[in-house]
Amino acid sequence: MDRLSARLAGKAKRWLFRLSPRLAERCKVEFRLEAPNRTFLENQIFGFLARHLAAGRTGGRCLFIGLDRYNWHYHRALGPGFHSIDIKPEHAVYGQPGRHVVGCATQLARHYAPGSFDVIVANGLIGYGLNRANDFDRMMRACHAVLAPGGVLVLGYNDRPDRLPFRAERVAGYRLLEEFTPPIEGVDCPHHRIDDGSRHKFVFLRKSDTKRVVARATRWRRLQAAG
């Protein structure tokens, strides 16, 4: 498709969405962002998450934090248990009826019961609104609370000093979850960096049982005390 045709197609999709989001949904309208990290998320990561959801404890419920026009179609890949939350009221139009909440990522417990989700995706929040270590800590604690045992959290962020002014791994809430390497082709560790200008990185975490969390926190305190 040439540039002019692409612009016209984009205008037509935006017009259709403004006319009727339901009609746009029936027509499978998408507003994709063309970027390597986004392609990896929508193909490899979502494929793994779909399999995890099918075997999960909550009947395939997942939570996507941060909803906008370019990711409003993600429920098609992640299934009927797709829920979303975004702090901006004007973004509610992109959510699925009855499954979108206007709210903050640091206050998930206000809206969801403990153990509500098998999957949470928090991509593109750090450095774009979630900019302080204490806010990140609150979000991680909130995610831990609403994840079911064995549930997976996928973090995605630009790993650059201008976007990440703190070390995510050193935040206490981060350590409530354990890192793991998912069975995704090309992924060989819990931290997977995309080779693009944004230095985007995906981190894979999961909620383990309470005893393992306590043991891991104890080991961390001992290492810290030892310098």
Image (cartoon, rainbow, N blue to C red):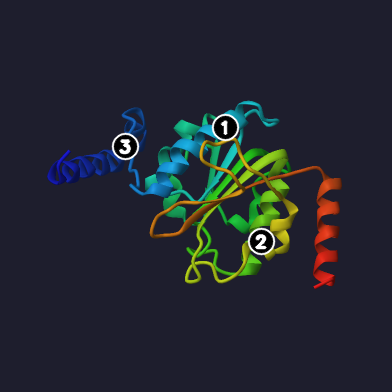
Q: Amino acid at mark 3?
A: Ser
Q: Which residue is mark 1?
A: 81
Q: Quadrant of the C terminus?
A: bottom right
- Res 59 → quadrant: top right
Q: Is residue 211 visible?
A: yes
Q: Secondary structure at mark 1?
A: loop
Mark toward the start of the polypeptide (1 vs 3): 3
Disc 1 packing (10 Å; few <14; some 14–19; many ≥20)? some
> From the viewer's perspective, is the residue at label 1 or at label 3 nearer?
1
Residue drawn at (47%, 35%) of the image = 75
Q: Check the image and report above or below for 82 versus 158.
A: above
Residue linked to disc 3: 20
Give the class, few, some or many, for how many residues have Cα within 10 Å of label 2's Cα (few <14, many ≥20).
Answer: few
Q: Amino acid at mark 1?
A: Gly
Is residue 97 visible to the viewer in this orientation of the structure?
no
Q: Residues within 10 Å of mark 3 (few under 14, many from 20)?
A: few
Relative to the observer, which residue lies in front, 201 or 112? 201
